[in-house]
Amino acid sequence: MSDPAPVWTLRGGRYAIVGVLGAGSQAETLDAVDKQGGCAVAIKRFQVRGAKSWKDVELAEREARVLSTLSHPNLPVYVEHFEEDGALYLVMGKIEGETLASLRKRQAMLSNADVARFLADADGVLAYLHSRVPPIIHRDIKPGNVIRRADGSYAFVDFGSVRDQLKPEGGSTVVGTFGYMAPEQFQGRALPGSDVYAVAATALSLVTGREPEDLPHRGLAIDVPAALGRAAEPWLVRALSAMLEPDPDKRPTHVTARPPTQRARDRAERETARERDERRRRRAESESESASAGEWQRPEPWDLYALREQGRETRQHLKAEARRFRRELKEQIRDETRRARRQAMNAMDARRHGRERWQRHEHGFGPAAPLLISLVVLALSVARVATWALFRLFLPIFLTILSVPLFSQRLRRAAWRCREVGLAGDRGLVHAIEAVRGRTLGRDIEAEGEAVPDDEVEGDAEPASERPRQTRASAAPRVRVEPLEPDADSELLDEDEDEDARRRQQR
């Protein structure tokens, strides 16, 4: 404990500071007297200016908010909180006693009865906190945050790391003390079972007088039997081993330590004595029968007692194997479910990534794909209108009008040829617009890699035997011009041509 600080007052002279109870990296706890109520209080001061990040300020404000909603005999009593001179102050009732950290510092270890009382008080506090909606998780239970009162009860303090909100989207802060934190807290996901792990680690540290990380381990789990030794109570070994399970799915969500009562101990001793007397009596009867028969015989291994013992051991073994098989089956089902879910999520991510990639046109357009596509589509649309106006309107009309005074059939054919070229150009531009918009990508690349017959390559003057074999993927794109069906105008023009031919013959 730090040396007493000079006396000063807070809150307009209401609280008189008489000393310092403890200090940390961001906050310190002051020993004070409430002049208005005439009682001793503990004031926790947090320096906002010295905070490393805004998360520390948020934790300080959350501690005050959570403590104001709690009411339990083993928790501090909230008085008020306020801000003064750039610091946050949390006023709570002072709990008289000694922290478990100071007990361990002076090498005072707890007895089995003290550990049982500590676990019982911790069970009550955690049941109260975890039953809130949403559950309140302390996240930093350790010897320094537990005070032992004069009557032997235990109070839990320092809610600076508490979590009172559920965050399904993730992003929880990793807080706690190394050695007393459950493995899942290192991943930023604190659960109600995480406080159970911290309580068990605190109890084990007080019984052994060593830090949890210095105790013997078996894999990721603390080897509780090796840490406590053979002289430890069986109920304590079983309880701490269960609560210190690294897997949160196998760990109990509440404190399970229940020491046997004196009646249960007496009953177990009577049963043990009765079985011991029964074995002695049977051995004596067997020896007397052998002596009366004149010779000593070894007791048969299949007598009733041996069969009963063997049957009990067999049942216990079968139960253990059944539990192990059920546990392994559950783990296998859980692993398969997670694997299938992961594969489904990967498939969904791949489809979404492909869709986004096609929408962004990462294959060539870059981040400015939408604007570029719009400009290309606009240019192609303008070219389509221009092609229609030139080859299907102005040139056919001009050539048709020019052929009337000249009686030229070639001009009329040229006019029809212009219309066919305009129609073919319009189809090509429509095809280009659809390709840019991504609608004909699958239709344009069909039968990729198949050989294209040599006679299908248009505009090639080389003989088929000397040309190299081409594929559909490498062949140049061709536009097939389909002849237009004659309409009413074409029939009239044909009649005009026939009439001109008859007139020339008559001349």
Image (spheres, helix red, strand yellow):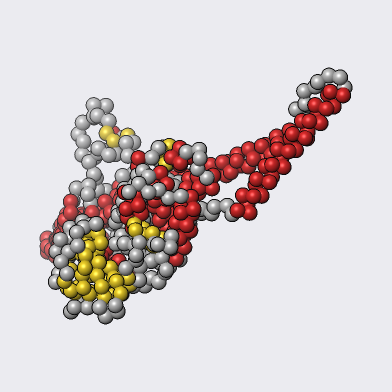
Above or below, comparing residue 223 to residue 139 in the picture: above
* Residue 66 point in image, percent of width and height: 34, 69
**Closest to the observer, 278 or 429:** 278
Q: Quadrant for the N terminus, please.
A: bottom left
Pick out the residue farthest to the right: 293
Q: Residue at x 41, y 65 (%)?
A: 74
Q: Point out the image quarter for the C terminus.
A: bottom left
Q: Residue at x 21, y 31 (%)?
A: 462
Is 131 above or below relative to 447?
below
Q: Position of residue 208 (x, y in %)?
A: 40, 44
Q: Position of residue 428 (x, y in %)?
A: 23, 53
In the depicted view, which residue is nearer to us: 112 or 301?
A: 112
Q: Is residue 253 visible?
A: no
* Residue 151 seen in this snapshot: yes
Q: Give me the residue at 34% from left, 58% from top.
A: 98
Q: Is residue 84 left or right of residue 322?
A: left
User: Foreground: 449 or 125?
Assistant: 125
Q: Position of residue 361 (x, y in %)?
A: 23, 51
Which residue is at the far top?
295
Give the answer, above or below, for where 138 lies relative to 361.
Answer: below
Q: Up-down: is 464 above or below 39?
A: above
Residue 54: image quadrant is bottom left
Say whether residue 15 is left or right of residue 283. Answer: left
The number of callouts visible is 0
Who's the residue at 83% across and 24% down the image?
290
Return the residue nearer the eye: 240 or 41.
41
* Occupied quadrant, residue 12: bottom left
Res. 301 image quadrant: top right
